[in-house]
C-alpha cells in the first residue's frame, strides 16, 4: 500500500432499496433465491463504485452480502439452531432473540470466500474483508452445549482461522475482526479474548485488523454512551495487552467520541484505523473536521501507520449521506497528506 494515509471504511455501507429496506439495520432481504444471489452481487458492484467515486483507497464489499455482521456468518456453521431462539442480553446492553448452540460448532463450507473472490476480480485496489470476532460471536448466541464462553470462543477462533486463510488465498489484503464486545468485557478480553483473536489469525500473511467500537447509532448504544461520562477510557483496559499481540491494525472510533486521543499511544507500533466519520449522525463532516481528527491522532501514531476510516458501519444511513461522508473522509485525508508533504 503506497498511498500515504490510505482511507477505508470500518464496515457496512447502505444497501440499495431494491435489496433491503433502506436506513434499517439488519433489514431482511427483499429478494429470494437466485434473484437474491444476483441482487447481492449487483449491490456489491454498486457499493464498490460508490467507494471509488468517493476516493476510498482500501475498498470492501460494503457488507452487501450479509444481513447481520455476526449472525450471517453463524448461519453458515453447523451446531447452531436458528429455530430455537433464546433471548439474551447483548453486551450487557440490549435484549435480542438469538440462535442456540446445540452441538459442536463447525464450518462445513466456506462462508464469504466466493464473495471475496468476486470482489477481487473487480478491482486492483487493496481490499479489506470483515469477519465477526470470536468474543462478539459468543455474545450473540445462547450456548446450550459448551456452557463456557471461553471454550466456545476458542472453537469459533479456529473456524474463523479456516475462513480467514481462504479469504487470504482469495486475495484479501486486510482481514478485519469486529470485536465491539472488547469494549465491555475487559477481564475476559485480557484473560482469553486477545488469545482467541490470535488463534483466529494464526499463520496469516495478510494484514490483520481488530475493529473495536461503541456500536452503530442505535438507541441502546446511544443510551449506553450517555452513561459513560465525559471521558471514554474503555480502550485503556485492553490496549496494553493488544499492543503486545500479533494483530497488525486496530480500528477505533475517534470522531465525536469522548475517547481521549492519547489512549492511542498505548498501542504504539500498531497501525491505527482512525475513525474520523461519525456514523451515528446524519450531519456530514467537513473535510476540515476530518482533518482535525486525523491531525490529533498524528500526535500518537506515526503517519505511515495512520489509516483514516469511519467510526463503524454506515448501513443505517441513507446512501446520499453515506457517500457524502466518504467523500469528506477522502478530502480530509487529502488535507493532511498535503500538510505532511509540505512539512
Ligand atoms: Zn463498529
Image: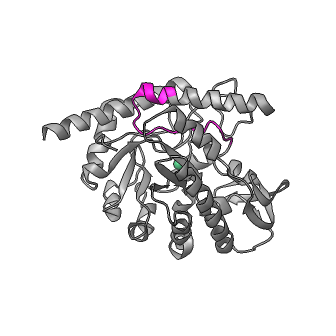
Looking at the image, can residue 314 be seen? Answer: no
Q: Residue furthest right?
A: 83
* Residue 75 position within the rendered picture, expressed as x and y whole percent measured from the top left: 75, 51
Colouring rule applied to residues: one colour
* Residue 91 position within the rendered picture, expressed as x and y whole percent measured from the top left: 62, 59
Q: Is residue 33 left or right of residue 38?
A: right
Q: Quadrant of the N terminus?
A: top left
* Residue 127 position within the rendered picture, expressed as x and y whole percent measured from the top left: 47, 42
- Determine which quarter of the picture holds residue 36: top right
The structure residue drawn at horizontal position 47% and vertical position 50%, both measured from the top left corner, is 174
Looking at the image, can residue 102 be seen? Answer: yes
Q: Which residues are magenta?
A: 49-67
- Determine which quarter of the picture holds residue 248: bottom left
Q: Main secondary structure of the magenta part?
A: loop
Q: Nearer the viewer, residue 45 or 214?
A: 45
Q: Is residue 141 above or below residue 145?
A: above
Q: Is residue 302 above or below residue 194?
A: above
Amino acid at each position: 500500500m503506497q498511498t500515504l494515509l490510505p482511507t477505508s471504511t470500518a464496515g457496512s455501507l447502505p444497501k440499495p432499496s431494491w435489496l433491503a429496506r433502506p436506513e434499517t439495520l439488519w433489514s431482511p432481504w427483499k429478494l429470494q433465491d437466485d434473484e437474491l444471489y444476483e441482487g447481492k452481487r449487483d449491490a456489491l458492484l454498486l457499493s464498490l463504485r460508490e467507494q471509488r467515486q468517493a476516493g476510498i483507497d482500501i475498498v470492501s464489499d460494503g457488507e452487501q452480502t450479509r444481513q447481520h455482521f455476526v449472525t450471517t456468518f453463524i448461519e453458515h456453521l453447523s451446531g447452531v439452531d436458528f429455530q430455537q431462539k433464546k433471548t439474551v442480553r447483548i453486551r450487557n446492553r440490549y435484549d435480542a432473540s438469538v440462535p442456540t448452540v446445540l452441538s459442536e460448532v463447525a464450518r462445513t463450507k466456506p462462508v464469504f470466500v466466493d464473495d471475496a473472490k468476486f470482489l477481487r476480480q473487480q478491482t486492483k485496489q487493496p481490499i479489506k474483508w470483515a469477519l465477526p470476532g470470536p468474543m462478539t460471536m459468543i455474545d450473540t448466541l445462547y450456548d446450550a452445549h459448551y456452557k463456557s464462553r471461553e471454550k466456545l470462543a476458542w472453537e469459533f477462533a479456529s473456524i474463523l482461522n479456516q475462513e480467514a486463510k481462504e479469504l487470504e488465498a482469495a486475495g484479501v489484503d486486510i482481514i478485519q475482526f469486529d470485536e465491539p464486545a472488547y469494549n465491555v468485557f475487559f477481564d475476559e478480553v485480557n484473560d482469553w479474548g486477545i488469545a482467541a483473536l490470535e488463534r483466529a489469525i494464526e499463520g496469516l500473511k495478510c494484514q490483520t485488523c481488530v475493529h473495536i467500537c461503541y456500536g452503530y447509532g442505535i438507541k441502546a448504544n446511544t443510551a449506553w454512551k450517555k452513561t459513560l461520562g465525559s471521558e471514554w477510557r474503555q480502550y485503556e483496559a485492553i490496549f496494553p495487552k493488544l499492543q503486545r499481540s500479533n494483530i497488525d491494525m486496530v480500528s477505533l472510533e475517534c470522531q465525536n467520541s469522548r475517547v481521549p486521543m492519547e489512549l492511542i499511544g498505548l498501542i504504539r507500533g500498531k497501525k491505527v484505523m482512525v475513525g474520523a466519520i461519525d456514523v451515528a449522525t446524519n450531519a456530514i463532516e467537513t473535510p476540515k473536521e476530518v482533518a482535525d481528527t486525523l491531525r490529533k491522532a498524528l500526535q500518537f501514531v506515526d503517519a505511515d501507520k495512520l489509516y483514516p476510516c469511519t467510526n463503524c458501519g454506515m448501513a443505517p444511513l441513507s446512501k446520499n449521506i453515506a457517500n457524502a461522508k466518504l467523500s469528506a473522509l477522502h478530502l480530509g485525508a487529502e488535507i493532511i497528506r498535503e500538510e505532511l508533504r509540505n512539512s
